[in-house]
Amino acid sequence: MTHTYFKNKAVLITGGAQGIGLGMAQRFAEAGANVIIADQDKEAGEQAVQRLERQKLEVTFIACDVSQEQEVKALMQQVGERHQVLHALLNNAGIADPFVGPLQELDMAVFDRVLAVNLRGPLLCAKHALPLLQQAEHPAILNISSTRAFMSEPNTFPYSASKGGLEALTHALAVSLTQERVRVNAIAPGWIETGEWQKESEQYQPNHSKEDKEQHPVGRVGVPQDIAEAALFLCSDKAGFITGQSLTIDGGMTVKMIYK
């Protein structure tokens, strides 16, 4: 399915230079898509292109801060000039560090910045990608949320709020874009190990303890490929009857009761 469905189809992945985004970029490129990576980190973007080129995969990198509307408009203009159409928009860009310290010490500028990237960004991308998505036969938007939208550790206010908002934005967009034939879904990843999927200066070898693995009923921590395979399906016409939904991919971690 994937090698025929995505061949020569334009797929835009924000935050696609590292981590889950890079994993999705690789998988969609393997499936034949014309992948555009948008990322604020130019160094990471250039390294991502080089990394995938070594695997004989061709992708395009465009620098963009998704929280800035003018940059998003410019991004979509470039995508339109190159492809005239967009088959799938994957809103993955986000500030991923969830911990900000005690509430009484919270810097509201940090809160505002996280929401600007993690929540405002996907909305801006959807808004300005819509004319290109409307040119596709089966267009799709996929938002990358988090299990932290449904459960929390202490002192993770901005990140949790942004991902909870993204879950709501997903079904709001889904019911709002029915006339435009755009399906909108989300994936809520759990613990995904991205150490080997970072830019070179930030790569590390994971070292998961027995306890880390046993938190997951499947017996291991997740990897970007786990998310990428599901993204590939949800953006294809095989998922044509699925919209407004959020798929939790966490190895069963959020359904396991843990007593200390």
Image (cartoon, rainbow, N blue to C red):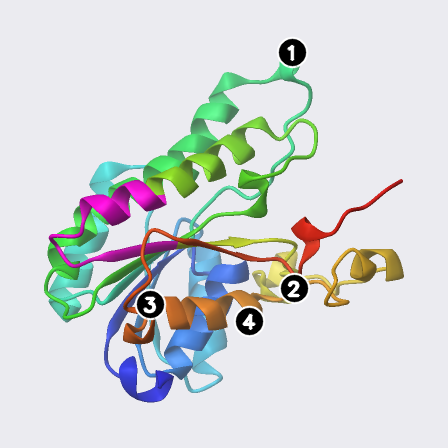
Residue under numbered circle 2:
222
> Percent x, y for residue 86?
20, 65
Q: Which residues are magenta?
A: 170-185
Circle nearer the N terminus (3, 1): 1
Q: Disc 4 and disc 2: Cα gap in Å?
A: 8 Å
Q: Residue at x 57, y 27 (%)?
A: 157
Give the residue pinned by disc 3.
235
Badge 2 marks a residue whose secondary structure is loop
Mark 1 Cα-neighbour bin, 10 Å: few <14, some 14–19, many ≥20: few
The picture places residue 211, in percent across and down from the top left corner, at 86, 56
- Answer left or right for 236 relative to 232: left
Amino acid on which the number 4 mark rests in the picture: Gln
Quarter of the image where the C terminus is located: top right
Pointers 4 and 3 in contact (CB under 8 A)? no
Residue at image mark 4: 225
Q: Earlier in the sequence, mark 4 or mark 1?
A: 1
> For this rendering, which residue is in front, 71 or 159?
159
In this figure, which residue is indicated by the disc labeled 1?
104
- Amino acid on which the number 2 mark rests in the picture: Gly
Whether residue 233 sits left or right of residue 106 in the image: it is left
